[in-house]
Image: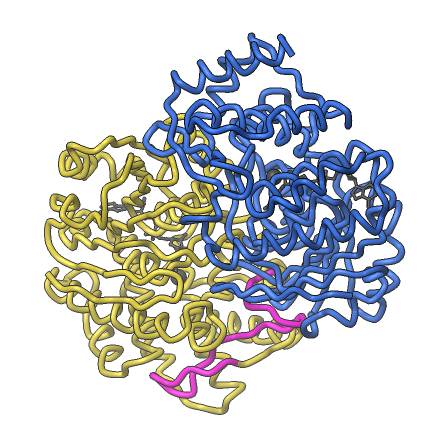
Chain colours: A yellow, B blue
Amino acid sequence: MRTIHINSAIQSYDIVIGEKLRHQIKDYLPKNYSSILVITDENVVYLYGNDLLQALKGNKVFLEVVPPGETSKSIQVYYQLLTKALEYSLDRQSLIIAFGGGVVGDLAGFVAATYMRGVDYIQVPTTILAHDSSVGGKVAINHEKGKNLIGSFYPPVQVLYDTETIQTLSLQDVRSGYAELLKEAMLANENFFTQLLSISLEQIAMKDLITALETGINIKATIVEQDEREAGIRKYLNLGHTLGHAIETRLGYGKISHGEAVAIGILFAMYVSQQELQVKLPLKQVKEWLTENNYPIALSFEQIDDLVEFMMHDKKVINSEIQMVLLKKIGEPVLHNINKQQIKKYLHSFIMSEVKG
Amino acid sequence: MRTIHINSAIQSYDIVIGEKLRHQIKDYLPKNYSSILVITDENVVYLYGNDLLQALKGNKVFLEVVPPGETSKSIQVYYQLLTKALEYSLDRQSLIIAFGGGVVGDLAGFVAATYMRGVDYIQVPTTILAHDSSVGGKVAINHEKGKNLIGSFYPPVQVLYDTETIQTLSLQDVRSGYAELLKEAMLANENFFTQLLSISLEQIAMKDLITALETGINIKATIVEQDEREAGIRKYLNLGHTLGHAIETRLGYGKISHGEAVAIGILFAMYVSQQELQVKLPLKQVKEWLTENNYPIALSFEQIDDLVEFMMHDKKVINSEIQMVLLKKIGEPVLHNINKQQIKKYLHSFIMSEVKG
Ligand SMILES: NC(=O)c1ccc[n+]([C@@H]2O[C@H](COP(=O)([O-])OP(=O)(O)OC[C@H]3O[C@@H](n4cnc5c(N)ncnc54)[C@H](O)[C@@H]3O)[C@@H](O)[C@H]2O)c1
Ligand SMILES: NC(=O)c1ccc[n+]([C@@H]2O[C@H](COP(=O)([O-])OP(=O)(O)OC[C@H]3O[C@@H](n4cnc5c(N)ncnc54)[C@H](O)[C@@H]3O)[C@@H](O)[C@H]2O)c1
Ligand SMILES: [Zn+2]
Ligand SMILES: [Zn+2]
């Protein structure tokens, strides 16, 4: 069991990482709550719902289960959860537990942020990807025009990462979460990057995965502590996300996993970096690794116009220019503004280079 | 022109009060914004829309007009405004201006709090009531089950109170805003209280009203500075609001003005104070003043059950008890927990005493 402490101007908290923590949640409640609402999804409740409810015995507990996947991060599901919270008479001294992947974490976190102007919540992540989403206090739901456009900065009171739960993840979800690890490595740690690419996902050992997760959490924690509200260096964590989010929105929420979309975005960011910054990056190596590990990386020419429109509505747009995270080299990110026409050109030549292989 | 500075842990800001400030808004923008979205309602846009738009010339300005009244503080209107903000390509460097009464302030403030995880906004209040709602950073929309149940603490970057605008208010809206002044006086300042009751609303002089407004703002500012997140003394500002909100919800949003509902709530709080705390308050005097000034103060027995249910869903409920603000005397509020049965009894005898006159 390891603990990483996060200092936050809004609310400091611990990230506790260890096996079987879901059984011990009672020991980690920071105080007595008048009632507890567990928000989870259908897959997670089936696998681990009983464990958590058992562990919470003695409290006044309510359970809300949403359909799995990105489509639950909608205004409709958000409002339904608020209605349920009211029907259960949750008061301001109540706790919400976000039990699941990044979807449940972002959604339940936004409910907690806005229910009666804010109640406490705990993140209990159950996916690899959620090592990223559960840390840093960003919560959000999607708008039909784009990902995560409705949300807040609202830190949890605790993150409890039970590493045992990730054993049941599908290979697609392993792939998805691993892409965010790759992102963190590329921002901050070349050794970590090399190590991640030396592994094949189908053969990865649990032990190695958990070590990688902790390294990833440490990188993320260091960044968000320095820049909680994303005024500066936290923006680097958006590496691959401008195009990534546009792909998710273009294909329809849930059609491609978040990490898979981000992986394409990372490749594109590397490609643009090489052009704009005149640098040489291990683009070929990353691309080969992604292909070997079955990431879907094909984009088509007819998607370009839509993708650019979605990119123009992203949170990273400033004065009609897209603020992209580029890399000078592995471990050295930089912000760079690019206009609409230029992005379009790059997307075109990027897809062209993909087609040519 | 007077300026009151508010220290806030989240974001400090100035309240500027003066005549014709709407024409000078450009001088008060704290920085350059990539674009500005003015959110207002149909009445305010008709009266003062041109003035504000003229004054903002030179900026990239968009205008969204919502129907007047409480029904606009809904999840539907909220989502529509987010959609519009996206269609106008508002980025994170944009500004939202809440131009209107408390409805527009609460609604536009919540849009600002959650659009792309938060953008700057300015409150430009145009009602007496909004002297209260524009200060302190509470923003919210309503849920069908209760008032202000969805929201955040999210301070504006500036409050610009153009006292000229209140000249066009209807008598009902003067009545509504005056009730919050009465509330502030009862919490903090007996002289102010006496003074407020010495005036008849139909004859009130602008000069006196503006002086009262400033006193009210000072009281509110002092309280929220000490307790921004309502962990302690800020709760006093809820005097009259537990029953007030229940009445608004029970009658249907907009059927009674917020301040008129609060006025009934204040009377009830005085009544309960006398019973629970064994004190003597100027209940009769307040009631007479309210009656003379045409506040609607009749409740009926058959409303009691519904009112109690709505009160049980209020933000002020803790562990199934209603936390009411009572008065030991004028200027000395106190928090007091009362259970459901007891509240029901008090409502019953309160209405009975009303009926008997
Ligand atoms: N807030 C942030 O800082 C942040 C950062 C990165 C990503 N995100 C968001 O996170 C979301 C993606 O998260 P995700 O990939 O975890 O998605 P997810 O929550 O949808 O989980 C993926 C799938 O795995 C299933 N699942 C969850 N735990 C499982 C387990 N232990 N065993 C088996 N199946 C399990 C889920 O039911 C779902 O079908 C996106 O919406 C993205 O925008 C947020
Ligand atoms: N956030 C807070 O701290 C706080 C505090 C108190 C009240 N509130 C909220 O404030 C709301 C009530 O505010 P309100 O009474 O200002 O309501 P409002 O905004 O609906 O305004 C009342 C009416 O006056 C009209 N109007 C506005 N300015 C005018 C002007 N200058 N001349 C003529 N007509 C004008 C409006 O169009 C509306 O019809 C409620 O929703 C209440 O919950 C919030
Ligand atoms: Zn991500
Ligand atoms: Zn009020």
Pick whichever, B235 or A296, lies toward us. B235
Q: Is residue A339 above or below residue A259?
A: below
Q: Is residue B277 above or below residue B297?
A: below
Q: Position of residue A110 (x, y in %)?
A: 43, 48
Q: Determine which quarter of the picture holds residue B196.
A: top right
Left or right, B337 with respect to B202, comes to left
In the displayed orientation, state which residue is furthest to the front. B280
Instruction: Tell which quarter ligand 2 is in.
Output: top right
Q: Residue at x 40, y 18 (%)?
A: B342
Q: Determine which quarter of the picture holds residue A10.
A: bottom left
Pick whichever, A245 or A281, lies toward us. A245
Residue A51 in magenta?
A: no
Image quarter where the C terminus of chain B lies is: top right
Q: Determine which quarter of the picture holds residue B147.
A: top right
Pick whichever, B118 or B121, lies toward us. B121
Residue A250 in sight in this render = no
Q: Residue at x 34, y 84 (%)?
A: A331
Residue A317 in magenta?
A: yes
Left or right, A183 with respect to B165, comes to left
- The region drawn magenta spans A313-335
Query: What is the magenta segment's predominant secondary structure?
Result: strand
Q: Residue at x 85, y 67 (%)?
A: B57
Pick whichever, B92 or B124, lies toward us. B124
Q: Is residue B291 above or below residue A33?
A: above
Q: Position of residue A327 (x, y in %)?
A: 43, 83
Image quarter where the N terminus of chain B lies is: bottom right
In the displayed orientation, state which residue is furthest to the bottom. A278
Q: How many marks?
A: 0
Q: Position of residue A7 (x, y in %)?
A: 31, 68
Residue B29 in sight in this render = yes
Q: Position of residue A108 (x, y in %)?
A: 38, 44
